[in-house]
Image (cartoon, grey):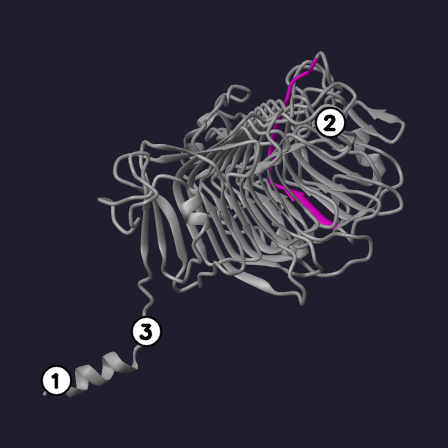
Amino acid sequence: MFYPLLLILLLLPSASFGTDYYVSAAGRDTNSGGSSQAPWRSLDKINDLILDPGDRVFLRGGDSFSGNLYFDAFDRGTAASPIRIGSYGSGRATILAGDGDGIFAYNTAGFVISNLNIRGSGANVNEGAGIIFYTDLPGGVKLDKVTLSKIDASGFHHAGVEIGAWNGTTGFKNVSIDGVRAYDNAKNGITVWGYDAPGFKGYAHTKVYITGSFAYRNEGISGAREPTGNGIVISNVDGGRIARCVAHSNGVRNTSSSGPIGIWAWRANRITIQFNESYGNRTTSGAADGGGFDLDGGVTNSILQYNYSHENDGAGYLLAQYDSAPSFKNNVIRYNISQNDGRRNTYGGIMVWSKAPLEISNSHIYNNTIYISPSATGNVCGIRVASPTSTMSIRNNIIFTTGGAPLLCVVGGQKGLSIQGNNYWSNGSPFKIRWGSTLYSSLTAFRSTGQEKLNGVSTGLFADPEMVNPGVGGIVGNPSALTKMLQYRLKASSPLINRGINLKSQFGLSTGTRDFYGTQLPQRGAFDVGAHELAY
């Protein structure tokens, strides 16, 4: 009577349980290494192995191991039965990588690496990365499954964590980076990159997810030509997400003219960056960026939403297109908050820039809340459009400036730029909008440009938005607590309630289902202006 059950078991896919290996500072390399009672002592014993699907490597928690782990194509797990590397016992094990990579995996995947501290010899001395997965296999293959969880990586030249590829569309898929702290590195905290050349089409990686991670004090390299000092940056990815992460205090040594950003993407498609905080990111005087968030050259079909950017040297939110990049189009910045960004050079809460002859096209900026005060080291503006654009819109945003800072700065040569339904407030100072070479001192005068009109009817407001306490959002430090930052909520008496343009009915734009604070859209049958939709 047990035959049916036996038949079911025989038909199920066979599981690979693999072999366990243990390493301890108290072990001996003459031991079997097959149990916690007979562990090896050195990482070289792991490097001597050929690991199979389901194998597990355990380093004793609390111990430190000098050396480097190296895996190649002979060490190959699968998505269903990955190779696992981690700690056992109490606490995390630490790999002291010296001047090299902590863990280098070459032309292989099917790995889960978790619960480890990885230390380099210092950002100015080390020549590697904390963990790097790299492939250059031919044939456009996508190596499946890389999971990095609860990793603490610092003191490396290239990055705390790095996923790279360089052979056409060859790369990785199903990459998960979760709960990583990458700090005190030189070039990047966390980075994903792939093959790039003018005219090249396609992407190296797909399904890349970075969540719950922190990237900070990655200071950059003085004299480097490329942007260094990035927090989290991904490129050559088709389908990815950066969510619930924090990037801060990066880029202070950058001198590149295409400087660093806290959290950003370039040459990528279908990227969502949401529920993050990016603050205090820097660049040097005369260098570029040092901003909070960015969709940069060649990004398409991507979105920045529900983020909080504040006190950055560069723009809080940037749309940028460099001259040799693929086309930049179909991108959105919505329901974000910017507080006192643009502290250095010439930036703003939100900025749009492109290198001629390329332009930002078919992109939309709506329902954001921007607070800007003057800076002694920066030429600030609420929203700055610094180059010609085509088919771009700026709608339903709150632009709140103090101390005489201009609300909006737009260069000439625009094609199809629509500015409608925004609320402007200069908090007791004169109204200032710069449009080309003209300075407008009232909303009524600005409408002579044809902006802030919809079907011949005036749109937009010059009114105190009546937020709870703008300008003092401070550091949250916990992405799960962003919705508790009450300073940018509208009061019940706000004139902006139900005054937003319905972007779906008027222009066919999908605004999503929620605001910055998680409130369902819309309330009371109409949209509010800014990042908060008041519910009562």
Q: Residue at x 53, y 40 (%)?
A: 306
* Mark 3, other Cα within 10 Å: few <14 / some 14–19 / many ≥20: few
The answer to whether residue 524 of the structure is visible from this angle is no
- Labelled pair 1, 3 in contact (Cβ < 8 Å): no
Name the residue carrying label 3. Answer: 14
Q: Residue 374: within the magenta?
A: yes
Instruction: Give whichever of discs 3 and 2 has the lower sequence position.
Output: 3
Q: Position of residue 81 (x, y in %)?
A: 38, 63
Position above or below: 166 against 339: below
Where is residue 381, by image quadrant? top right
Q: Position of residue 532 (x, y in %)?
A: 51, 37
Seen at 41% across and 47% down, the residue is 45
Looking at the image, which is closer to me, 526 or 402? 402
Residue 2 numbered tag: 1
Mark 3 or mark 2, which is nearer to you?
3
Residue 490 lies, in percent from the top left, at: 50, 31
Amino acid carrying label 2: it is Tyr
Q: Residue furthest left?
A: 1
The residue type indicated by label 1 comes to Phe
The residue indicated by pointer 2 is: 347
Residue at figure coordinates x 70%, y 27% from the top left: 348
Residue drawn at 59 percent across, 26 percent down: 123
Residue stretch rendered in magenta on the structure: 362-375
Distance of label 3 from label 2 (alpha carbons): 58 Å
Secondary element at image label 3: loop
Q: Quadrant of the C terminus?
A: top left
Mark 1 or mark 2, earlier in chain:
1
Q: Is residue 530 above or below residue 346?
A: below
Q: Nearer the viewer, mark 1 or mark 3?
A: 3
The three-letter amino acid code for the residue at tag 3 is Ser
Residue 411 belongs to the span the image colors magenta: no
Q: Circle 1 sits in a helix, a strand or a loop, which is it?
A: loop
